[in-house]
Image (tube, rainbow, N blue to C red):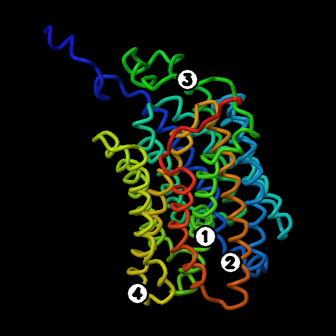
Amino acid sequence: MAAETTEPASGPARTGRYRWVIVALLFAATAINYIDRQMIGVLKPTLSADLGWSETDFANVIFFFQMAYAIGYIGFGRVVDIIGERLGYAVAFTIWTIAHMAHGGVYSVAQFAMARFGLGIGEAGNFPAGIKAVTEWFPAKERATAIGIFNAGANVGAIITPLLVPALTIAYGWRSTFVITGGFSVVWLVAWLMIYRRPAYKPQVTPEELAYITQDPADPVTPVPWRKLLTVRETWAYALGKFFIDPIWWFFLFWLPGFLGKRYDLDLVSFGPPLVVIYLMSDVGSVAGGWASSRMIKSGRTVNYARKMTMLVCAIAVTPVFVSQSIDSLWLNVFVIGLATAAHQAFSANLYTLPSDLFPRSAVGSVIGIGGTVGAIGGMMMAKYAGFVLDSIGSYTPLFAVAGSAYFLALGAVHLLSPRLARAELSNS
């Protein structure tokens, strides 16, 4: 008995697991976020036929979503640092739910772009608030795993969308489908406001779990000014990483259904199973990427080695997507693209941990906001490029070439700007 009571309660099994309830909430939020976001990609053939869109029209609608996302990301990053993740998430959810439902009442490209703009503003709050919540609820050594799990909600949303949306569209029409799916957000918002508090204010958190969560050295609580964050290399290590990889995920999300439909003559219903397989693979990648670097850290590797080695492996795994346009077998291409999307999610799970690795908690939301904005700017450029390429030459080959090289550029930027992933120097000197 004496040995049992004196042994340190350092392992997760001894400390309680309520923090994983918070991850479950974040997972559900991200799944809803991606259902709302990906619907336009799944409905692209239907919307193009009904509203008479060209590839450039579709690209312009995506462009305005990403413009709003760029604005909203940096705004919500700061909002979350000031008012906290609980209220920040609630505000974001409210905005994007209203905008999402509004899609059902639009008739022109301009009106659709306005609805997507509102959706982009609200959806931009998902990751700044979610990652700030992980920073509050997890020690550094578990954050990549927690982020990988809640980031996997993106893939679950992407899996659900091609199964749910075609069925609802066939039964009720695409306009009603936007309204019906918007109802999911309302349910989540109520649950979030009822459940979420910081660890010290939750009676379900044991003293042992609270000690485990707060084991890292205390950070300053004063928000760090943007002007200071913009002058340190570590901010740009994260932001440039986002600039290179975020446009590739947007490309997969918004253009992949159209590519599969055109390349393999699939319709609204038949491209569902291939997309499900691709995003199931992505889900595995998201969790595996976070687990891999967390495992290396727990085994004694440095954070610098663990994060960057995981990202290097992911960058290599994406390269076969270069030849996707020329693959005649649908299911072989599904594997190649699924491997690329899985590698993206694993890479992203590690990139998302860098703000919490490099900055005090009071700056995490702002740094994530800056990075998200820079990533969305890259996405805007990719949208314009995709529309131009597809309308002018009708081939996806140049787009897959960009996708296959972007991750090496992202890792190179991270390594050049933060060779050791050392904490940022934010002194007031």
Spatial separation of the CA atoms under disc 3 and disc 2: 43 Å
Work out whether residue 65 or residue 100 is closer to the camera in this orientation and state it: 65
Q: Earlier in the sequence, mark 4 or mark 1?
A: 1
The residue at which mark 4 appears reads as 329
Q: Mark 2 and mark 3 in contact (Cβ < 8 Å)?
A: no
Return the x and y of residue 373 as percentages of the image width and height.
71, 53
Tell me the mark number nearer the camera, choosing from 4 and 1: 1
Mark nearer the viewer, 4 or 2: 2
- State the CA–CA distance, disc 3 to disc 4: 50 Å
How far apart marks 3 and 1 lie (CA) works out to 36 Å
Instruction: Indicate left or right for 219 with 64 as reference.
Output: left
Q: Which residue is identified by label 3?
A: 198
Q: Amino acid at mark 3?
A: Arg
Residue at image coords 64%, 23%:
221
Label 4 and label 2: CA atoms lie apart by: 23 Å
Local SS, label 3: loop
For this orientation, the residue located farthest to the front is: 429
Q: In what element is the residue under mark 1?
A: helix
Tell me, for residue 62, which label it has, or none: none
Q: Position of residue 262 (x, y in %)?
A: 58, 85
Q: Earlier in the sequence, mark 4 or mark 2?
A: 4
Mark 2 neighbour class, 10 Å CA radius: few under 14, some 14 to 19, many 20 or more: many
Residue 232 against residue 86 in the figure, above or below: below
Q: Earlier in the sequence, mark 3 or mark 2?
A: 3
Judging from the image, what secondary structure is the residue with disc 4 in? Answer: loop
Comes first in the chain, label 3 or label 4: 3
Q: Return the x and y of residue 2 as percentages of the image width and height.
A: 15, 8
The residue singled out by tag 1 in the image is 251
The relative height of residue 89 versus residue 276 in the rendered view (above or below) is above
* Left or right side of 285 for 262: right
Proximity of marks 2 and 1: CB atoms separated by less than 8 Å: yes
